[in-house]
């Protein structure tokens, strides 16, 4: 065999010896050779000495005597007091090598017969070392946001906040530094029992708003979005440095049975159609915040090999008592929210079947808040025409001539809500004080998932059914279902992969509502009418759920009130260097956004949706102006969503340059049959023609194995007609006046955000990387004429276009050991 070949085999066994000082490399070893590092390592440890002329002669076949000499030197090093190997597998490989060279080693004076004693000692040392293992990671991010707004920004003379229409997050001006360190221990307590734990430390310096959205995502027990920090987010304390260390998780495992108990943070086995944990608003991920409680997992034989899970988790909930909605007052959540359930998963040679059950509920917290209601904050009244939940007649109360117990209402309503909202389930007290009143909520969810590979055809299915009670004190409940079936095929030897899914999700499926924490920041709140006095998170690009709220299932994969198809074709060429991915989705509403509850009771008119109705984008259609029993939706057209995506990537072999081009277009459409001349306001409300486009060009050039330069350009466009989206993205008061027939269907927004960027990744060592990114951000109002972004549709005046521009600097250091 060639010398380099056996050299690599020996090097794989020898690499866990203590490293020696560096030695000059043989001059005839090519710099680009795949075994160069192995040669250098073994030469530095004195195991390779080369030929008298100082060369290695790697192209020359090695003799058994040369191999035996290297093994003899290794055995001599093994007899040193502190020499050791990492695993028993390494010792086994060494034993095979010694046995094959027994005669040559004996001729060299190596006592092979006594090797067993040395191996026995090393085996004991390895066993002791393997009982306890340490590992960890370190991640730190420094981010600096510097922006400036000009033009007509919500009528404000100055503003430092805007919505990032690429990520759906809020741009906050400020600087922050965050650091997260994880230290873990795995221990083999005995042959039957293993244990481990992880400690997590988190440091926050600078602006907490910037850190929460753009810094290192904090561990569960230190995370703002899990409501597990006592830091006040009033502007007076939002700049205060703080450090925390917590026990993140602890686990025990019975090795023979595979039974494992985890206490603390963990990832669940649930299918995302049932439960995915809260979506993480932090731009750096992970996608979900995870769980915190306890989990029992294991495997057994029930009909066939089966994995199981029993779990209990705290559910983050940032709800607060809005009667204390003033800076400096600590938010109060009236409930502790939690979920519990189990999964059973049967694994087969070519597939699996999984059954899951989930129970989620609000539990009353002692001395929570006066009235004991759950107030879901509605920034700018956007949810009001969408989540317009009202009590069906048989579950209503607090209305004259109705003797029902007020605690038995389907949705909680106070005297104020009756007086101000005519029986609606929300209170309208002016801008900044809208909220829904529900709770204590409860939900049961049962699901079935499975997949099977017929090679090359594969099949998958997800089924789930939920039963929701917006008030567990009442008898009202609403059932909903979600369904997805998929077919896929791997063709052309795996080069081409095709996937087609059909899904249907009821508007009443999994509608239990949770809220991210509300923020009082006087730096923003003092700007009257500014829509950004919270850390809002829009679910771009598909607008699959409400801003600042989250639900149990993954709304990106299973959006409420949608049915239709997803298609994906992924083609790889030039080996693994090139790929083209084509995506197309076509969805429509399951139910139209027309109120389905209407009656008059005790002289009070009630109109709205049955509690549990979720429609995150296509808001309520206009009515005939009447109310109660006389209410009639003027039309019931359904909305449609189409998505086209094209992703192309290629790595140029000669230069090593990697180029990726991504284009995605989302088109939201709801037609209207109404006449704008006779009913301009209704047309303006019902008609939706909204487009969202993203374009990205990404380049990555590796100068060497350690340094990679990155550059690119990203752009997002939000254009079209949508009454509520226009109101939010153009600020309060932008679309409050009555439109005219001429502009009832005109575009009311045209925003373009461009981000050219430059960055690099540098591998400082095998376990340490450093990265830097500089983004040049520009968000512009491109509308022209009197109707458009930041324009009043009834106004003929043209104001200065809104512009928001600046830089965002990221630098990150990551270490793993």
Image (spheres, rainbow, N blue to C red):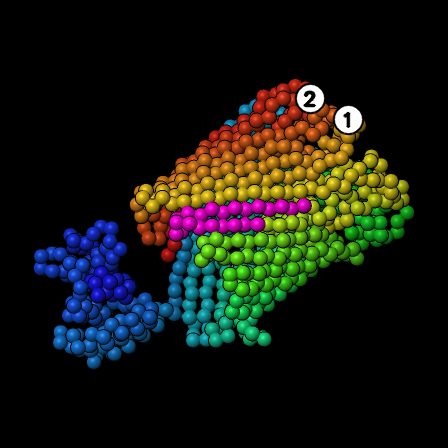
Q: In front of the other: label 1 or label 2?
A: 1
Front position in the image: 346 or 665: 665
Q: For mark 2, give the secondary structure.
A: loop
Lower position in the chain sequence, tag 1 or tag 2: 1
Span colored in magenta:
567-588
Q: Residue at x 53, y 35 (%)?
A: 716
**In this rendering, position of residue 522 left or right of residue 139:** right
Give coordinates of residue 271: x percent, y percent: 59, 59
Give coordinates of residue 259: x percent, y percent: 52, 71
Q: Find the residue positioned furthest to the left.
A: 52
Q: For mark 1, give the secondary structure.
A: loop
| Majority secondary structure in the magenta region | strand
Give coordinates of residue 622: x percent, y percent: 77, 36
Q: Residue 477 got which mark?
A: none
Q: Residue at x 18, y 68 (%)?
A: 67
Q: Is residue 681 magenta?
A: no
Quarter in which the C terminus is drawn: bottom left
Q: Is residue 571 magenta?
A: yes
> Please, is residue 471 above or below residue 742 in the view?
below
Proximity of marks 1 and 2: CB atoms separated by less than 8 Å: no
Front position in the image: 307 or 502: 502
Give coordinates of residue 592: x percent, y percent: 74, 44
Front position in the image: 193 or 498: 498
Q: Find the residue positioned furthest to the bottom.
A: 113
Check disc 2 and report the residue beneath it. 795
Check disc 1 and report the residue beneath it. 677
Instruction: Note whether residue 518 is visible.
Output: no
**In this rendering, position of residue 782 left or right of residue 204:** right
> Please, is residue 162 above or below residue 41 in the view?
above
């Amino acid at each position: 065999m060639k010398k380099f070949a056996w050299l690599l085999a020996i090097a794989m066994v020898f690499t866990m010896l203590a490293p020696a000082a560096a030695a000059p490399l043989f001059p005839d070893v090519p710099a680009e050779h795949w075994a160069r590092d192995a040669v250098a390592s073994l030469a530095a440890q004195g195991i390779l000495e080369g030929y008298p002329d100082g060369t290695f002669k790697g192209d020359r076949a090695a003799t058994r005597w040369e191999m035996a000499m290297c093994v003899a030197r290794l055995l001599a090093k093994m007899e040193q007091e502190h020499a050791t190997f990492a695993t028993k597998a390494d010792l086994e490989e060494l034993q095979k090598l010694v046995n094959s060279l027994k005669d040559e080693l004996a001729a060299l004076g190596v006592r092979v017969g006594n090797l067993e004693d040395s191996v026995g000692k090393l085996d004991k040392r390895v066993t002791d070392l393997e009982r306890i293992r340490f590992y960890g990671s370190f991640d730190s991010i420094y981010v600096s946001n510097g922006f400036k707004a000009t033009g007509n920004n919500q009528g404000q003379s100055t503003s430092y906040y805007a919505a990032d229409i690429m990520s759906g997050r809020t741009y906050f001006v400020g600087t922050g530094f965050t650091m997260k360190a994880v230290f873990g221990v795995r221990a083999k307590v005995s042959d039957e029992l293993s244990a481990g734990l992880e400690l997590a430390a988190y440091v926050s310096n600078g602006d907490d708003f910037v850190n929460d959205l753009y810094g290192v995502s904090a561990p569960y027990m230190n995370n703002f979005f899990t409501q597990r920090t006592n830091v006040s987010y009033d502007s007076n304390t939002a700049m205060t440095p703080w450090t925390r260390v917590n026990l993140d998780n602890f686990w025990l495992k019975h090795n023979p049975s595979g039974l494992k108990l985890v206490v603390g943070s963990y990832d669940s086995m649930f299918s995302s159609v049932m439960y995915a944990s809260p979506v993480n608003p932090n731009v750096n991920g992970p996608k979900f915040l995870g769980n915190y409680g306890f989990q029992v997992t294991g495997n057994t034989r029930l009909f066939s090999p089966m994995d199981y899970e029993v779990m209990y988790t705290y559910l983050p909930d940032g709800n607060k008592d809005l009667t204390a909605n003033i800076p400096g007052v600590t938010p109060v959540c009236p409930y502790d929210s939690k979920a519990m359930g189990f999964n059973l998963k049967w694994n087969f040679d070519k597939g699996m079947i999984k059954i899951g059950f989930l129970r989620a509920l609000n539990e009353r917290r002692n001395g929570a808040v006066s009235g004991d209601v759950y107030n879901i904050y509605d920034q700018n009244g956007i949810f009001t025409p969408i989540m317009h939940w009202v009590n069906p007649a048989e579950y209503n109360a607090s209305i004259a001539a109705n003797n029902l117990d007020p605690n038995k209402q389907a949705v909680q309503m106070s005297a104020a809500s009756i007086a101000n909202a005519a029986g609606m389930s929300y209170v309208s007290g002016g801008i900044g004080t809208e909220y829904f009143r529900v709770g204590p909520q409860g939900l049961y969810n049962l699901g079935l998932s499975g997949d099977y590979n017929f090679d090359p055809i594969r099949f998958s299915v997800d089924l789930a059914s939920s039963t929701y009670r917006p008030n567990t004190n009442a008898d009202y409940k609403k059932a909903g279902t979600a369904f997805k079936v998929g077919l896929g095929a791997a063709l052309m030897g795996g080069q081409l992969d095709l996937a087609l899914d059909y899904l249907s999700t009821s508007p009443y499926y999994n509608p239990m509502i949770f809220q991210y924490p509300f923020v009082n920041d006087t730096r923003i709140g003092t700007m009257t009418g500014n829509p950004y006095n919270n850390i809002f998170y829009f679910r771009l690009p598909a607008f699959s759920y409400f801003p600042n709220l989250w639900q149990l299932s993954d709304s990106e994969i299973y959006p409420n009130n949608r049915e239709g198809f997803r298609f994906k074709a992924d083609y790889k060429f030039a080996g693994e260097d090139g790929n083209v991915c084509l995506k197309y989705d076509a969805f429509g509403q399951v139910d139209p956004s027309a109120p389905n509850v209407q009656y008059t009771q005790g002289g009070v008119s009630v109109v709205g949706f049955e509690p549990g109705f979720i429609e995150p984008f296509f808001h309520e259609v206009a009515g005939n102006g009447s109310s109660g029993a006389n209410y009639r939706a003027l039309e019931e057209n359904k909305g449609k969503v189409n998505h086209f995506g094209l992703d192309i990537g290629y790595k140029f072999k000669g230069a090593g340059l990697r180029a990726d081009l991504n284009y995605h277009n989302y088109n939201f459409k709801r037609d209207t049959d109404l006449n704008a001349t006779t009913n301009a306001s209704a047309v303006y409300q019902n008609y939706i023609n909204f487009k969202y486009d993203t374009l990205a060009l990404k380049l990555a050039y590796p100068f060497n194995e350690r340094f990679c330069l990155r550059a690119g350009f990203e752009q997002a466009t939000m254009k079209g007609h949508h009454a509520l989206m226009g109101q939010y993205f153009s600020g309060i008061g932008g679309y409050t006046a009555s439109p005219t027939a001429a502009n009832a269907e005109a575009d009311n927004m045209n925003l373009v955000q461009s981000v050219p960027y430059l960055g690099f990744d540098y591998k400082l060592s095998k376990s340490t990387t450093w990265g830097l990114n500089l983004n040049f951000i520009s968000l512009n109002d491109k509308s022209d004429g009197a109707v458009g972004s930041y324009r009043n549709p009834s106004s003929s005046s043209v104001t200065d276009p809104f512009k928001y521009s600046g830089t965002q600097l990221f630098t990150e250091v990551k270490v793993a050991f």
